[in-house]
Image (spheres, rainbow, N blue to C red):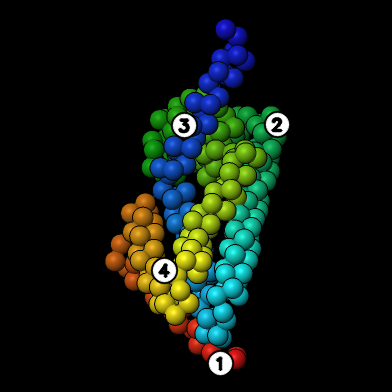
Amino acid sequence: MTMDAAAEASLPRGRLARLRAAASDPGSLRLWTAVANDGIIATAGILEGFAGAGANDRSLLVVAIIATVAGMLAAGGIEWSQAATEREAQQTAAAAEAQELARDPAAEAAELAEHYRSRGVEPALAAEVARQLMAHDALAAQLETEHGIRHVMSAAETLSTGVGAVVAYAIGAVIPLLITALVPQRAETWAIVVAVLVSLVVTSIVGARSGRTNVVRTLARTLAVGAGTLIVSYLVGQLIT
């Protein structure tokens, strides 16, 4: 089997591995839970505002659908744009480092050794570490030590970041959307409040554990933002009618 054929044969497994890695990555989980919280709070807040203004069931359902779709596109677009901008910055740094390496590799090696000496490594050992890193992958060594870049993102990764945000927002927004569609209007306002608070508890716990932060403080902050948004939105809806 040729190298190209082997690569093609392993492609599905590679994609599955990347999916597993993203699902278990603390940074990705924090991002997704934050976006899901945005979907929950923003959609529910809009609905509470319209409910406070006396909107009927049909109007609330239309608003919920529009808010969900608009929020999904906005969340996905913003995250994709930020990831694409970061990728461009990484590529610019990589191009600049590649030019410097081509122009004066000895100076770059000395710079790398100095980096480790400044961190307390003995001069001789720092020089040896720099030599081995430069021999293995000079560009990667320079990018990590000078720019903190351990991996230059691909275009597919920036796209998957945006798609992940779309899915996460949809998961959050669908909770108040389903309540609007299924619960009678007389119980809708309180049903949304209860469902939103319960959902925020779940996402806050997931986000706090993935980020290794204090669960109670994370939970308190998220619930305060969620409850405050719902109350203010409802009152604004009542005031403008």
Label whose residue precedes the other's in the sequence (4 or 3): 3
Looking at the image, residue 58 lies above or below residue 211: below
**What is the spatial separation of the Cα atoms under label 4 and label 3, in whole angstroms?**
33 Å
**Picture residue at 60% right of the left edge, 29% below the top:** 106
Looking at the image, residue 192 lies above or below residue 125: below
The C terminus: image quadrant: bottom right
Viewer-closest of 158 and 72: 72
Q: Position of residue 35 (x, y in %)?
A: 51, 59
What amino acid type is highlighted by mark number 1? Answer: Leu
Residue 239 - label:
1
Mark 4, other Cα within 10 Å: few <14 / some 14–19 / many ≥20? many
**Picture residue at 36% right of the left edge, 55% below the top:** 206
The N terminus: image quadrant: top right
Label whose residue precedes the other's in the sequence (3 or 2): 3
**What is the spatial separation of the Cα atoms under label 4 and label 2, in whole angstroms?**
58 Å
Residue 173 - label:
none
Label whose residue precedes the other's in the sequence (4 or 2): 2
**Picture residue at 44% right of the left edge, 57% below the top:** 33
Residue 75 occupies quadrant: bottom right
Q: Secondary structure at mark 4?
A: helix
Please indicate whether residue 4 sits to the left or right of residue 133 in the image.
right
Circle 4 sits on which residue?
Answer: 196
Residue 17 - label:
3
Res 67 visible: no
**What is the spatial separation of the Cα atoms under label 1 and label 4, in whole angstroms?**
23 Å
What amino acid type is highlighted by mark number 2? Answer: Arg
Circle 2 sits on which residue?
Answer: 103
Please indicate whether residue 195 sits to the left or right of residue 146 in the image.
left
Eye-nearest disc, 4 or 2: 4
